[in-house]
Image: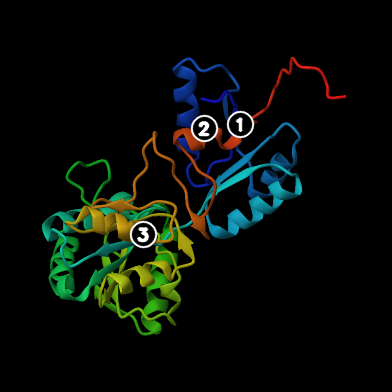
Amino acid sequence: MAGNTLVVKHAGCVPQCAIAFEKLLLDAGAPDGLYTNLIISHGQSDRVVDDARIKGVALTGSVAAGRSIAARAGQNLKPSSMELGGSDAFIVLEDADLDHTIKWAIWGRMYNTGQTCCAAKRFIVVDTIADKFLEKFQAAMGTLKAGDPLDEKTTMGPLSTEQALVDLLKQVDTAVGHGAKVLIGGKRVDRPGAYMQPTILTNVSPENPAFRDEFFGPVAMFFRVKDEDAAIALANDSDFGLGGSVFTKDIARGRRVASRVDTGMMFINSISWSDAELPFGGIKNSGYGRELGDMGIQEFVNKKLVRYVAGEAPV
């Protein structure tokens, strides 16, 4: 929209999707070269960042990849934006509409089988409503059925790759080894494909590696807290700061809580989401810069000053 051309190095496991996006733009009438896929390796990416024709670098990926690419861009004095991991807090206060909240809890954790940077991952619930929430949340998670993602009746699809499933199962085993309890799930689904059972972890202490991790898949962590202040403190006790949500019938209270949570985005009575007109991005290990909206359009624009002065120079 700002007039920039794009060269894109996609994730190595989805070349077909990247090719389809390029074809879609060309079929729509975009000029050749406006959007070009680079079928290259990670190692070759450094050469692209180094190229003088590249004026800015945007990455969506892991924290490790962000550190590497941001450093390379910095060496070349090029602007960059980083959209990295997330461990979004889903805060439930005692006055929340529980039926409304549970629907968003399931959607927030499980859309795209939980493989979303801004998915709800840490469910932080005030003690007076925690038992009811957990009972309903567990029951709803238990109704999800793995199946063909192209079948409209499927309510839970697979993970992106076999390796993604193996890594996630290992994360759960590590969490359990450090004292976490598996309320439901925690295992592979017995069917062809990279499917994992919907999983809820409880008793995750700050010393547990899971407390700092991002679970990129159908794994929810449940935390019980005393009150609103404790919920905010726990939400902020994270290396990530992408998005988050708070559920309450008192919208003024929701705004107050949202203002105290250290993230790039907060949503009241819904989940973190992306819309073309809204800026999207985070802080801390979730990265920097913004995508989408006016802020996203201007992320890689040279705001050049041109001034005409009619007066005489001072003597």
- Residue 137's spot in the image, x, y percent? 18, 65
In this rendering, the answer to whether 287 lies above or below 57 is below
Q: Residue at x 26, y 47 (%)?
A: 148
Q: Residues within 10 Å of mark 2 (few under 14, many from 20)?
A: some
Residue behind mark 3 = 217
Residue behind mark 1 = 301
- Residue 198's spot in the image, x, y percent? 26, 63
Q: CA distance from mark 1 to mark 2?
A: 7 Å
Asked if residue 150 lies left or right of residue 31, the reply is left
User: Which of these two is toward me, 226 or 63?
Assistant: 226
Q: CA distance from mark 2 to mark 3?
A: 30 Å
In this view of the protein, can residue 146 be seen by the observer?
no
Could you say which quadrant of the image residue 171 lies in? bottom left
Could you say which quadrant of the image residue 149 lies in? top left
The mark nearer the N terminus, 3 or 1, is 3
Q: Which mark is residue 297?
A: 2
In this rendering, the answer to whether 194 lies above or below 93 is above
Q: Quadrant of the C terminus?
A: top right
The reply to whether discs 3 and 1 touch (Cβ–Cβ < 8 Å) is: no
In this view of the protein, can residue 181 be seen by the observer?
yes
The reply to whether discs 1 and 2 touch (Cβ–Cβ < 8 Å) is: yes
Could you say which quadrant of the image residue 217 lies in? bottom left
Q: Amino acid at mark 3?
A: Gly
Q: Amino acid at mark 2?
A: Ile
